[in-house]
Image (cartoon, rainbow, N blue to C red):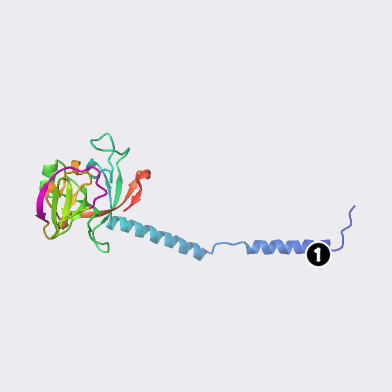
Amino acid sequence: MRLPGLGDRAAEAVDRRGLLYVLASEPHLDPLMIRALVALLVVVFVAVVVFFVAYAKLYRIPSAAMEPTLRCAAPALGCTGKASDRLLAIRLRWPFRGVSRGDIVAFRPPPKGAATCGAGGVFVKRVIALPGETFAERNGSVYVNGKRLVERYVKLRDHQTIRLRRVAPRSYFLLGDARSQSCDSRVFGPVPRKNLIARVVATYWPPTRIVVR
């Protein structure tokens, strides 16, 4: 039989008080904080949905006209990708900036484009010449306002020669990066500003092709 030692009860009492202190100090979420967090998440979700509805457009690359910058799925003619690139584009409306040379844009071709290129719907090309500028092509090299354009993105160049022409006001001269496989403004002429839909800002699929532009 063990007799309680001096101070045993006091030690037990201290332990109980310490345990109560630890339990009382455990962090817990305030209901107001939880409601505020939920409200914030709802606002963010709604903002994302509104943004996508108002500004975002999604596209898939169906042809080799923009190879190798934008790939389509082999074994289609000229395509080098395992899967077609999928693009995120932002509508050309306020507050986002307009169109600059070198931008990749989605647009509706003029009637001549749909008839001549054998395809309708939405095209994706690169902005080469702006309203009021001159465009010419000499043996596959592009000249804007008389100066040769440095185009590191062009891997499939043709050897066309196109006489000097001036881009009409509020119109844009658009070319595919795969010049030898692209039906573009060299065929159907400059594209009116009203036909431009969106500027491509990212490739989001497949995962190995993700890039922000």
- Which x, y percent locates residue 54? 27, 58
Q: Secondary structure at mark 1?
A: helix
Q: Which residue of the protein is positioned furthest toward the bottom in this rendering?
A: 32
Q: Is residue 156 magenta?
A: yes
How would you classify the magenta stretch by its main secondary structure?
A: loop
Q: How many marks?
A: 1
State the image quarter where residue 5 is shown: bottom right
Q: 182 above or below 167?
A: above
Q: Residues within 10 Å of mark 1 (few under 14, many from 20)?
A: few
- Of 42 and 89, which appears nearest the observer? 89
Q: Is residue 111 magenta?
A: no
- Which x, y percent locates residue 163? 9, 50
142 horizontally vs 90: left or right: left
Residue at 24% x, 45% y is: 66
Q: 82 above or below 57?
A: above
- Of 10 and 97, which appears nearest the observer? 97
Q: Bounds of the magenta span?
A: 150-166
Decide if residue 63 is in sight here.
Answer: no
130 horizontally vs 206: left or right: left
Q: Which residue of the protein is positioned furthest toward the top in this rendering?
A: 75
Residue at 35% x, 60% y is: 47
- Which x, y percent locates residue 202? 32, 51
- Of 56 and 189, which appears nearest the observer? 189
- Which x, y percent locates residue 21? 68, 64
* Residue holding disc 1: 10
Decide if residue 31 is in sight here.
Answer: yes
Callout 1, which amino acid?
Answer: Ala
Q: 10 above or below 126?
A: below
State the image quarter where residue 156 is shown: top left
